[in-house]
Image (spheres, helix red, strand yellow):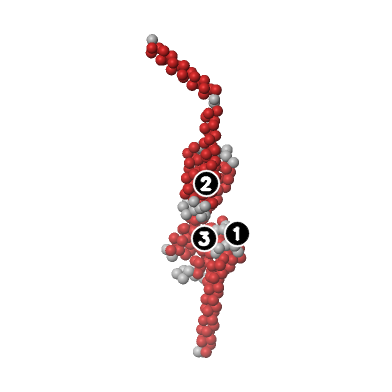
Amino acid sequence: MGREHIGTGKCILLCIACLIFSLFPGCATIKKFENRSSANSMLLESRKLISEGNFDGALKENERVMSFYIKEPPGDQAMYNMGLIYAHYMNPGRDLDKSLMYFEKVIDEHPQSPLAEQAKIWVGLLKKISMDEEYFSRSSKMLSRGDYQGALKENRKVLSLYNTASPGDQALFNIGLVYAHYGNPDKDYLEAIQYFEKLIQKYPGSPLVEQAKIWVNVLNIIEKVKQVDIEIDKKKKELTR
């Protein structure tokens, strides 16, 4: 009989618990609100850390947000932030492959997010940068092997894609260097000068302009010296007749 009373008591307690939760459905909502508020604070802290140059700390804050909200906001913002952090030019741990991965995750996991369109722009940009770096990497390897024609070809590919936009300036500079290279059997200082001058004219704001001007000056001096030597040889021949 005592056991029956205990069983009945448990049932009553369970019923009361169910009644309480049915009367206060807001408990779960409050908890969710607290989590979201905490996540927003983490995102704000992330921005602060980025401004201070603490990129590792900023990554950790966004990772914490993603652990709470994988498939819903503000998880999309955290993923987007991670992409930005890995692409940041001042980040010593800059990793464009990881940046690309996070932007693609925003697109795949949060297709309805307002950040998805911005992420698509970043994906396109990062893929172009990756392709350009691949061209320049191949060019550098070819140059080190003495394949000057191959290096010219790779840089001209970049130039055909970016005739008036960066990294076209880098391609022009590289072509100038190839034509001026001491080991190039087809070196042509006048051709090199033309490419350096194109860089100066088309990309006046490029950080390579000052170096290009130095090269133009040096190569012009060499060409003038060559011309003087030619004139001297010509005079010598005339005197020996």
Task: Please tell me which of labels 2 and 3 falls first in the chain.
Answer: 2
Q: Which of marks 2 and 3 is in front?
A: 2
Residue 15's spot in the image, x, y percent?
A: 48, 18
- The residue at which mark 2 appears reads as 46
Around disc 1, counting alpha carbons within 10 Å, would you say few (fewer than 14), some (14 to 19), or many (20 or more)? few
Say above or below: 20 vs 170.
above
Amino acid under disc 1: Thr
Q: Is there any visible trace of residue 201 in the rendered image?
A: yes
Task: Please tell me which of labels 3 and 1 falls first in the chain.
Answer: 3
Identify which residue is drawn at 53% across, 22% down. 22
How far apart marks 2 and 1 lie (CA) works out to 37 Å
Question: Is residue 93 shown left or right of residue 124?
Answer: left
Disc 2 + disc 1, Cβ < 8 Å? no
How far apart marks 2 and 3 lie (CA) works out to 39 Å
Q: Which mark is residue 105?
A: none
Q: Is there any visible trace of residue 97 in the rendered image?
A: no
Residue 150's spot in the image, x, y percent?
A: 47, 61
Residue 231's spot in the image, x, y percent?
A: 54, 83
- The residue at which mark 3 appears reads as 155
Around disc 2, counting alpha carbons within 10 Å, would you say few (fewer than 14), some (14 to 19), or many (20 or more)? many
Query: In what element is the residue under mark 2?
Result: helix
Say above or below: 138 vs 1.
below
Query: In what element is the residue under mark 1?
Result: loop
Residue 193's spot in the image, x, y percent?
A: 55, 70
How far apart marks 3 and 1 lie (CA) works out to 14 Å
Foreground of the two, 107 or 64: 64
Task: Please tell me which of labels 2 and 1 falls first in the chain.
Answer: 2
Amino acid under disc 2: Ser
Identify which residue is drawn at 52% across, 52% down. 52
Amino acid under disc 3: Asn
Identify which residue is drawn at 49% across, 44% down. 61
Q: Which of marks 2 and 1 is in front?
A: 2
